[in-house]
Amino acid sequence: MLNIGTPRRCFEQRPQTIGNTNVSKYNALLAPLQIKSLMIRNRIFSTGHVPGYASDGLPTERYFRYHEEKAKGGIGLTIFGGTTAVSPEHTAALWSQLRVADDGVIPHLAGMRERVHAHGAAVMIQLDHLGRRMAWNTENWIPAMAPSPIPEPGHRSFPREMDQHDIDRVIEEFAAATWRAREAGLDGVELSAAGPHIFAQFWSPFCNRRTDGYGGSFDNRMRFSLELLEAVRKRVGPDFVVGMRVPGDEYHSEGLHPEECLKIAKRLEDTGMIDFLDVYGGQSYEHYTFSMTNTNMSFPIAPYLHLPMAFRSEINLPILHAQRIQDIDTAARAISEGATDMVGMTRAHLSDPHIMRKLMEGRPDDIRQCVGAAYCIDQLDFGPAMCLHNPATGREEHLPQTLVRKTSGLRKVVVVGGGPSRA
Ligand SMILES: Cc1cc2nc3c(=O)[nH]c(=O)nc-3n(C[C@H](O)[C@H](O)[C@H](O)COP(=O)(O)O)c2cc1C
């Protein structure tokens, strides 16, 4: 077990035997992980992602149940609120994101904490500013802003260049949002550079063409995130868990290459202000490269596992990683072979939120297997995320995730065209 700091709260401990199945090969997944005083009951988590279940920037009953179900299903950590807007002008209507730009959100975040903690899982929120990826033509109709005015194809935005006032304001907004998460009793926050969003837009030479103190040299490109971390720690102190989602390789000639990604990670670690790093591969600079971050069926299993491996050999922080690790055998191997400290199985939990419970009951074969079709994320352009395999996901209010088999009054039915679903 990786041990950093002193334990504050202990969730369920690792069972010695699981059901009647020989699950020793899965034992690595069941070891708890401690980050500062937070004890996470096992090595499986769901990454920050936006399922489109919020309304007016606030979580709904649908949203609560979606994460609560994963906690019931035995997950170690669930990170809710993908691309959560820290700024008031930042559109929440795009993909129905959460917005945490004022204190009124605190009871709603606390509501999520209660629902998830009730079932023994840890819960964090992903905090974000989309920068140049922000939609300008929804909600507030405010132009996007970014380190540099480079047009963004995904949302057809022509961002204006951030001035010093914008930079100071966004830094303060991240600090205030982190404080709100702490006040709500969440177990931590993940500041997200994924996308790449605002942090990585400052880091990346592709997005950052500035000639002032925030652009050019490596130190200058790091300045925004380092100032931001200082502001965050000033507001929440040293004990609250603050992690970051960071690139391991952007796979783009003008973007961040592996050596520079490691250098960024090392610099973040050296501040002593970061508690974990969640490593991803890819970027969305071009339309066609977006698929590199949301790896679909055309990608091999665990295509970027070498990225957390490289981080683990250089960085002394817990390393998290997701991206097309959809089956527990691959997840167990990734942990037992030391490639990463936690495995994200995000789409896999849309397909089956009860992965860990089934594993611990000795029923790994009953896990409803995600194939990585990425229908869930594609669907976001049209409305709430839905799963190709599991009609109950996102509809837990009306459809139970656990079906009780009837013993009497059975009817014969014929299923025509079941597609990739299973009976
Ligand atoms: C519906 C959906 C929405 C997503 N939104 C976000 C997001 O807001 N922020 C983020 O960092 N990643 C987001 N992602 C990407 C996931 O965090 C994760 O990296 C990706 O699904 C790969 O992991 P997986 O193969 O375990 O699903 C999203 C993924 C899905 C399926």
Image (tube, rainbow, N blue to C red):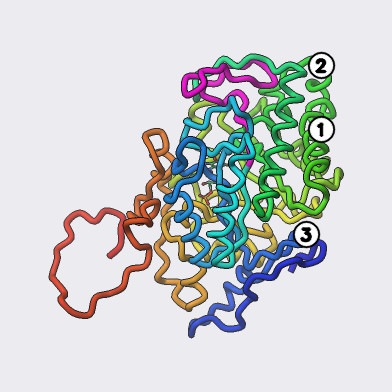
Tell me which label, 1 or 3, sits earlier in the chain: 3
Residue at (53% x, 56% y) in the render: 345
**Residue bearing mark 3:** 36
Tell me which label, 1 or 2, sits earlier in the chain: 2
Query: Callout 1: helix, strand or loop?
Result: helix
Q: Quadrant of the C terminus?
A: bottom left
**Residue bearing mark 1:** 227
Task: Identify which amino acid the numbered label 3 is placed on.
Answer: Lys
Q: Are marks 1 and 2 in contact (CB under 8 Å)?
A: no
Q: Nearer the viewer, mark 3 or mark 2?
A: 3
Magenta-drawn segment: 127-152
Residue 42 vs residue 328: left or right? right
Closer to us: 196 or 331 = 196
Q: CA distance from mark 3 to mark 2?
A: 36 Å
Residue 384, placed above or below residue 420: above
Question: Would you identify the image quadrant in which residue 381 lies?
Answer: top left
